[in-house]
């Protein structure tokens, strides 16, 4: 008898072990289908086989549920010698039937299991990573109280095509059959979609039927790829933009060395990692392209991860330019239908290269030889809901299993990756210290805003920055201004009593919006009018502290309009969460900036990466402090990265560039070091602190988040978990491990929920997941208070 392990797709319950079901014999299978008619509706499809990776319908309690098969094995007779002891033959139930074809294979099933253990996450959430965009079949309860199977709304779409038949050449329509003559004439130019004919000639179905009967035409169904086939009516998306074939440049010596390191890693076939540590513009992408080319030539495939925000048509175009139509693209700005089609294109085996955001790792790309993670230091590679995985760690695990190699690229590699290169023989670091075009890196100047203030300036633009803008814009060149808003945006502060208006639901300070003059909470959307006087002491001196892009734009307008030699209407292109929310908005704004002569691009951190404009000669960081002051262990690393990344945007081509960094803390090590491109200086300051305070890479951490609407409950549970973890760590034998006291998070209240956490630290080489897993698997979920474990958290906010 065959037994299957099935992971039930019931996310609200903690069902953290697969369930065992009998696999129905062929006969059973048909019988189940026949009987299914009344329960699941007439559309039930019965022609899927029960296989690993397939969604199946199973009995569960008094109803039926959907699950995913992760394992199938043959066991002899129930109760026989190899029969699993934990399976009671009397209680064993059979899978009703499969409701999809396989979404993943044994390797995917193993990865889901690993993810669930490594990140202490529900198995169902881990398996769901592997299912196609647009959802899977599910059981829904109708108004009559009965459960019925609902297939996903997103799936393949077919177009009907009219293709010339054998009788077309000799066919001549009768005189009065006008429409028939038109259709036949149109088809002599080649095949057409029914929809196109109908748009041109009106209803054509009877004409087509008549022609089909005479073998003049055939009507066939063909799969359509949404977003790809430049359909006249469809929007232009990332996928269907024209790509020009690109030629390979001769590699620089550094690039050639990097490429051969990658080739060695590929040939070793044991999951080696190559960190390409190259300044912005050093030609890392060209190295990836040539490495991929070799992998493809060996018959294997490649997966390229890019931060969501850098997944622009330009980025995709570079891969399509080299590998043409074998490139699949996957990111969240595509519609579900487009993503489904790309997913299915990958599943079909026709896609050889996948370029996508972190979730592209889980697409059904077979035979992967190389996984590239560009900008590997980026925070967006860590998922912030269960499973809280880091794409880098998953890629390394996958590569080790499949004998592939991993390439990490960055101008500012994460401290974790640098540490691995130093300690782990499977990791290698290669340097590209110079730009591919031989241009120097731009000069970075730090502007001390405290001094500007002391000298009487009240503007958010220092004299140096204003002068720089004037010089560049009046010469017809472009500037990029970065307004870093992460964490703390602009808020109101009473100059007399220090009161700061806060969100009543989240306890974070409210962000002030100039236009409309209101305060808003960026976590939950709470909104109120700006008070005219301090609500606490009635003082009228409310200062607007820190600035959002909106106000900077307004102030910049005033500054630019008064500038000599700079026209009154120099475009300011603002890019922030507000202006880029619509589909394609991001791209439109960039194109606007590219098309302009002199112009300023003003934006949040989303502009710091990936932009490659030849005529940007000035980059200004308006407030380096917002990142620096974030109460998190990674704040300094992020500040250093941000300045280096944004500096890389200046002077990429012929024209030299310069960078101005405004800060109230011009002495801070990350800022001084970034200004000199001196990573060693930064690390000399940072690493001893990390070691002393016990932060990665010297320790591993798990952050147990506890949240709920009633703070005393949250606090009580957090404290209980702290005690339980103490015991769990003790019984695991973690002598030098530390369970920190339960405390409120930095973001102590978000969307009306109170947030506490318990942080656990252990030696860098310890298996933190294994120590915690038994406890969290055993824990019964609490109805009112949520608990989530973040293993190797990216921040502790
Ligand atoms: P990175 O990914 O490191 O930021 P890119 O791959 O974008 O760098 O390369 C920067 C620019 O240099 C691109 O315009 C690219 O076409 C060009 N480039 C890369 N390698 C070479 C080379 N070997 N010779 C000439 N130009 C190159
Ligand atoms: Zn006050
Ligand atoms: Zn709020």
Image (cartoon, helix red, strand yellow):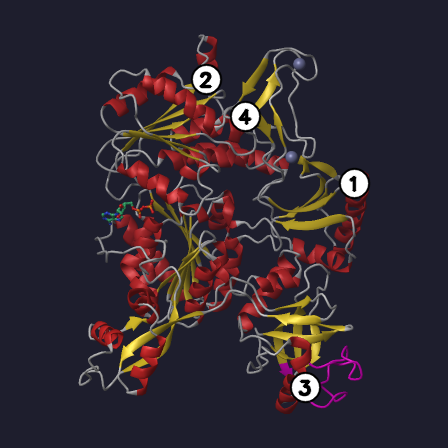
Mark 4 or mark 1: whose residue is earlier in sequence: 4
**Dominant secondary-structure state across the stretch colored magenta:** loop
Magenta stretch in the rendered image: 73-94
> Which residue is more in the foreground, 125 or 257?
125
| On-image quarter of the C terminus | top right
Mark 2 or mark 1: whose residue is earlier in sequence: 2
Mark 3 or mark 1: whose residue is earlier in sequence: 3
Toward which corner of the image does residue 241 lie, by quadrant?
Answer: bottom left
Point out which mark residue 490 bears: 4
In three-dimensional space, the C-alpha distance between marks 3 and 4, rounded to whole angstroms, equals 65 Å
Q: Position of residue 516 (x, y in %)?
A: 53, 26
Mark 2 or mark 4: whose residue is earlier in sequence: 2
Q: How crowded is the residue under tag 4: few (<14 C-alpha within 10 Å), some, or many (20+)?
A: some
- Position of 350 relative to 772 (above/below): below
> Which residue is more in the foreground, 228 or 690?
228
Q: Position of residue 641 (x, y in %)?
A: 45, 37
| On-image quarter of the N terminus | bottom right
Point out which mark residue 449 bears: 2
For label 1, the SS is loop
Which residue position holds label 1?
710
Which residue position holds label 3?
75
For label 3, the SS is loop
For label 4, the SS is loop
In three-dimensional space, the C-alpha distance between marks 3 and 1, rounded to whole angstroms, equals 50 Å
Toward which corner of the image does residue 119 lie, by quadrant?
Answer: bottom right
Q: Position of residue 668 (x, y in %)?
A: 49, 25
| Mark closer to the observer (2, 4) | 4
In three-dimensional space, the C-alpha distance between marks 2 and 1, rounded to whole angstroms, equals 43 Å
């Amino acid at each position: 008898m065959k037994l299957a392990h099935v992971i039930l797709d019931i996310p609200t319950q903690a069902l953290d072990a697969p369930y065992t079901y009998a696999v129905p014999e062929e006969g059973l299978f048909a019988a189940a289908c026949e009987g299914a008619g009344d329960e699941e509706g007439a559309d039930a499809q019965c022609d899927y086989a029960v296989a690993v990776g397939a969604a199946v319908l199973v009995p569960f309690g008094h109803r039926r549920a959907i699950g995913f098969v992760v394992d199938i094995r043959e066991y002899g007779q129930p109760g026989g010698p190899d029969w699993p002891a934990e399976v009671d033959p009397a209680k064993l139930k059979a899978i009703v039937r499969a409701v999809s074809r396989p979404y993943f294979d044994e390797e995917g099933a193993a990865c889901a299991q690993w993810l669930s253990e490594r990140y202490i996450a529900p198995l169902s959430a881990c398996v769901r990573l592997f299912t196609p965009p647009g959802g899977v079949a599910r059981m829904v309860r109708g108004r009559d109280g009965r459960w019925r199977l609902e297939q996903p709304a997103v799936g393949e779409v077919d177009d009907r095509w009219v293709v010339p038949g054998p009788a077309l050449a000799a066919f001549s329509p009768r005189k009065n059959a006008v429409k028939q003559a038109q259709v036949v004439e149109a088809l002599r130019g080649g095949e057409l979609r029914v929809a196109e004919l109908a748009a041109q000639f009106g209803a054509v179905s009877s004409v087509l039927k008549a022609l089909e009967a005479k073998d003049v035409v055939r009507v066939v169904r063909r799969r359509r790829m949404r977003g790809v086939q430049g359909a006249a009516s469809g929007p232009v998306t990332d996928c269907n933009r024209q790509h020009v074939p690109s030629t390979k440049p001769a590699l620089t010596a550094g690039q050639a060395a990097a490429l051969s390191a990658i080739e060695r890693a590929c040939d070793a076939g044991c999951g080696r990692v190559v960190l390409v540590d190259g300044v912005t513009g050093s030609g890392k992408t060209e190295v990836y392209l040539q490495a991929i080319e070799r992998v493809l030539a060996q018959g294997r495939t490649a997966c390229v991860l890019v931060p969501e925000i850098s997944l622009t048509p330009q980025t995709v175009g570079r891969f399509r330019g080299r590998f043409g139509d074998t490139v699949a693209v996957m990111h969240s700005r595509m519609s579900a239908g487009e993503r489904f089609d790309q997913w299915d294109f990958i599943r079909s085996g026709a896609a050889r290269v996948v370029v996508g955001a972190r979730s592209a790792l889980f697409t059904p790309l077979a035979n992967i030889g190389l996984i590239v993670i560009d900008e590997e230091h980026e925070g967006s590679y860590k998922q912030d809901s269960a499973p809280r995985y880091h794409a880098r760690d998953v890629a390394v695990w996958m590569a080790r299993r499949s004998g592939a190699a991993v390439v990490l690229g960055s101008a500012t590699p994460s401290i974790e990756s640098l540490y691995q290169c130093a300690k782990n023989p499977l990791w290698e670091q290669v340097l590209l210290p110079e730009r591919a075009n031989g241009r120097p890196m731009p000069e970075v100047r730090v502007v001390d805003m405290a001094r500007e203030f002391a000298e009487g300036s009240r503007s958010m633009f220092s004299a140096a920055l204003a002068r720089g803008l004037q010089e560049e814009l009046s010469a017809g060149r472009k500037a990029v201004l970065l307004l870093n808003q992460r964490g703390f945006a602009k808020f109101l502060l009473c100059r007399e009593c220090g009161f700061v208006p806060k969100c009543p639901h989240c306890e974070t300070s409210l962000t002030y919006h100039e236009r409309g003059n209101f305060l808003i909470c960026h976590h939950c959307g709470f909104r109120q009018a700006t008070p005219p006087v301090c609500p606490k002491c009635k003082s009228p001196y409310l200062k607007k502290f820190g600035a959002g892009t909106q106000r900077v734009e307004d102030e910049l307008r005033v500054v630019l309009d008064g500038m000599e030699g700079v026209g009154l209407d120099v475009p300011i292109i603002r890019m922030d969460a507000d202006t880029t929310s619509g589909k394609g908005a991001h791209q439109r704004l960039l194109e606007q900036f590219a098309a302009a002569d002199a112009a300023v691009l003003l934006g949040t951190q989303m502009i710091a990466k990936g932009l490659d404009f030849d005529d940007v000669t000035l980059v200004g960081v308006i407030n380096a402090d917002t990142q620096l002051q974030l109460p998190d262990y990674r704040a300094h690393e992020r500040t250093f990265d941000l300045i280096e990344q944004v500096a890389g945007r200046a002077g990429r081509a012929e024209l030299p560039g310069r960078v101005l960094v405004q800060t109230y803390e011009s002495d801070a090590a990350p800022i001084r070091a970034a200004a000199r491109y001196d990573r060693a200086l930064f690390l000399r300051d940072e690493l001893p602190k990390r070691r002393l305070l016990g932060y990665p890479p010297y320790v591993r951490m798990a952050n147990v988040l506890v949240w709920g609407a009633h703070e005393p409950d949250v606090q009580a549970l957090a404290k209980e978990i702290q005690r339980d973890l103490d015991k769990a760590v003790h019984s695991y034998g973690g002598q030098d491990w530390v369970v920190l006291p339960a405390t409120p998070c930095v973001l102590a209240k978000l969307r009306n929920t109170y947030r506490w956490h318990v942080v656990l630290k252990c030696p860098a080489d310890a298996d933190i997941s294994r120590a915690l897993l038994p406890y969290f698997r055993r824990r019964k979920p609490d109805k009112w208070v949520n608990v989530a474990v973040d293993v190797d958290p990216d921040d502790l906010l």
